[in-house]
Image (cartoon, helix red, strand yellow):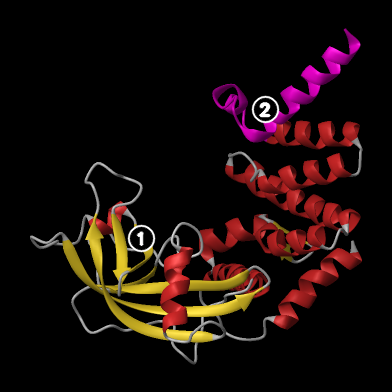
């Protein structure tokens, strides 16, 4: 356990800077002006985003700002309510809940300002863009000197820092929220703080240490769930089951899944038979029965 918990301390030491994740801010029901992460710049619209970046020589550790338009999509297309076009390049899209707030003119277009950041990664050029939503003068969270996390390592560190800050603020706040967070703590660490360290240990194939950390997190999640009357967060059990499967310890895999099921409130499993862990245990038993028959 010492090694796994030591990784949590290591991550904390690495993240000795203030950090916020801009794109986790919740937009109000009536949207105010804000900058928002553009979707699909690294997937469906990656080619367009890269073409725009290269046009301006931003094909490495780059930054650029540009004007474009949001093209109104088919009103019935819930998944893609607006495509962002900049200098002939389709670089991303906005979701329908944002597009509904826009007043598209007769042309079906809405002006937009974007800021795009680029980084050369192991998988090639990565582009991420933010657009300004609102008629007021843009007030950007990220800038040339305050860049968003772009690499997997930077994103993991940022996510860890964001979680640790959330836990720290909840404890400092006091009252019911602090009490709730204390329920989820084991050995001074809240189970939410173990997500990125577990992922890192798995990437490094340090499976036993990852499993130890999963077990610590599972205990914290169970303590919280038992006190508050809900099912434990399943992710930590799912990770433990995956690790045990890789380690070829099927009896322990079944046991850890059954532990989660037993920790759920009465009637929860019956009402939710398609829960991932429930389905996994059912399939394991079906395979075992098939082998015996």
Residue closer to the observer: 142 or 15:
142
First in sequence: mark 1 or mark 2? 1
Name the side, left or right, on which 273 lies relative to 216: left
Quadrant holding the N terminus: bottom right
Query: Which label number is shown at residue 279?
Result: 2
Residue at 76% across / 34% down in the picture?
257
Q: Secondary structure at mark 1?
A: strand
Q: Is residue 177 magenta?
A: no
User: Where in the figure is residue 200, as x and y percent of width and height?
Assistant: 77, 64
Residue 199 image position (x, y, % from top left): 74, 59
The residue indicated by pointer 1 is: 93
Name the residue: 84% across, 39% down: 245
Looking at the picture, how far across and down is residue 136, in whole percent? 20, 80
Q: Which mark is residue 212?
A: none
What element does badge 2 sit on? helix
- Residue drawn where x is 84% and y is 36% of the image: 253
């Amino acid at each position: 356990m010492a090694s796994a918990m030591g990784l949590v301390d290591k991550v904390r030491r690495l993240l000795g800077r203030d950090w916020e994740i801009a794109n986790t801010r919740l937009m109000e029901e009536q949207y105010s002006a804000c900058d928002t992460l553009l979707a699909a710049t690294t997937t469906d619209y990656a080619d367009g985003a890269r073409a725009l970046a290269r046009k301006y020589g931003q094909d490495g550790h780059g930054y650029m700002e540009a004007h474009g338009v949001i093209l109104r999509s088919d009103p019935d297309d819930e998944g893609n309510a607006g495509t962002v076009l900049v200098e002939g390049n389709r670089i991303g899209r906005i979701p329908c809940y944002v597009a509904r707030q826009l007043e598209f003119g007769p042309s079906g277009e809405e002006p937009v300002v974007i800021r795009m950041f680029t980084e050369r990664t192991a998988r090639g050029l990565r582009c991420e863009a933010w657009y300004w939503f609102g008629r007021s003068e843009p007030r950007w969270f990220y800038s040339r000197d305050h860049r968003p996390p772009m690499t997997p390592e930077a994103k993991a560190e940022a996510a860890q820092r964001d979680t640790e800050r959330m836990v720290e603020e909840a404890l400092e706040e006091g009252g019911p929220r602090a009490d709730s967070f204390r329920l989820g703590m084991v050995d001074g660490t809240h189970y939410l703080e173990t997500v990125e360290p577990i992922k890192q240990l798995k990437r490094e194939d340090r499976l036993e240490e990852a499993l130890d950390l999963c077990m610590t997190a599972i205990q914290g999640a169970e303590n919280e769930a038992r006190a508050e009357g809900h099912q434990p967060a399943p992710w930590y059990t799912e990770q433990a089951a995956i690790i045990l499967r890789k380690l070829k310890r099927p009896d322990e895999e079944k046991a850890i899944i059954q532990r989660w099921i037993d920790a759920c409130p009465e009637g929860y499993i019956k009402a939710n038979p398609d829960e991932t862990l429930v389905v996994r245990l059912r399939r394991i038993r079906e395979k075992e029965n098939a082998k015996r028959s």
